[in-house]
Amino acid sequence: DGSICLNVSGVSPQIQWSDGTTTACLDNVAAGTYSVTVTEGTCATTINDIQLTAPAPIGVVALVTSPSCSNRSDGAIRLTTSGGTMPYTHFWNDEVNFESRQQLLAGDYVVSIVDGNNCTFSDTIQLIAPNELTIASAGAKDISCAKANDGSILPIISGGTMPYFYEWNNQQLTNTLTNLSEGNYRLTVTDANNCKTNAEFSIARPSPLSIRLDTLVHASCAQLNDGRIRLSASAGQAITLSDGTIIAMGLN
């Protein structure tokens, strides 16, 4: 949208620009080098190397601070704008018109810049946060009997930013818990960016063991082995006689 105009004197000068234009003014042209020849009668004058300049293209450098947690709004974008013609006006896709931004969640932010000559430039800036910090269970082992302390919990941690720090409600600071009794256990995990998540695990005990005598038939004689005992056991337990013989498994 540049222009060059000549102030030409004479009776009836003829004007010829390097692009073929024959008027005194060369309008709506881009930056570049132009020449013009002015002729009157047998006399001609040529002007070479007329420089038409333009501002440098608008550009932007973004200094990005990504959010520290998946759901935390502590991201930031700081812009340095150059080129074009000052002053600059910044328009963001979330209707904020500051050059630099703070307290941002992860996501895509589009900025449009308009300079003093109404030239425009747009750019998309992406803020990427760590994946969500989560706790899953690789297996919680219940205790083997009512008064045992042989339960265990093995959690699996993912997301966030390593290293992870562990704190259980029984004051343990390790990833895995062992030698547990019946009860509920709560784990809080904190990552390197102070993002936190928690989960609860339950260690159960088996159903109470009960044995019922169903049948008792005494031996008919001292020397005979024709006696019989029939028992029923609950909770999937094996029944072992005093001589060490296992005679039942589960319900019998």
Image: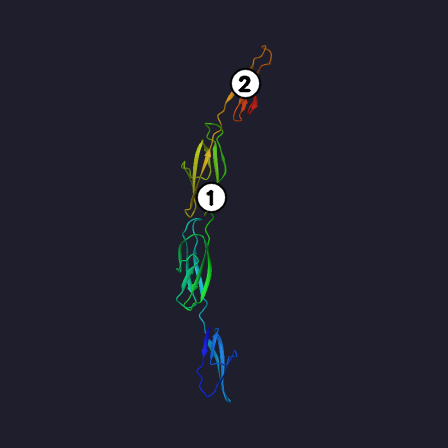
As helix, strand or loop, the secondary structure at mark 1 comes to: strand
Question: Mark 2–mark 1 contact, CB under 8 Å?
Answer: no
In this rendering, the answer to whether 92 lies above or below 9 is above
- Residue 71 is situated, as x and y percent measured from the top left of the image, at 43, 48
Along the viewing direction, whichever of 222 and 138 lies nearer the viewer:
138
Within the image, what quadrant is residue 214 found in?
top right
Residue 155 appears left or right of 221: left
Q: Sequence order check: which comes first, mark 2 or mark 1?
A: 1
Within the image, what quadrant is residue 223 found in?
top right
Residue at numbered disc 1: 134
Residue at numbered disc 2: 214
Q: Which mark is residue 198?
A: none
Q: CA distance from mark 2 to mark 1?
A: 52 Å
The amino acid type of the residue labelled 2 equals: Asp
- Residue 55 is situated, as x and y percent measured from the top left of the image, at 44, 70
Q: Could you tell me which residue is drawn at 49 percent across and 78 percent down?
A: 34
As helix, strand or loop, the secondary structure at mark 2 comes to: strand
In this rendering, the answer to whether 120 lies above or below 186 is below
Mark 1 is surrounded, within 10 Å at the Cα level, by few (under 14), some (14 to 19) or many (20 or more) other residues, namely: some
Along the viewing direction, whichever of 210 and 227 lies nearer the viewer:
210
- Residue 100 is situated, as x and y percent measured from the top left of the image, at 40, 59
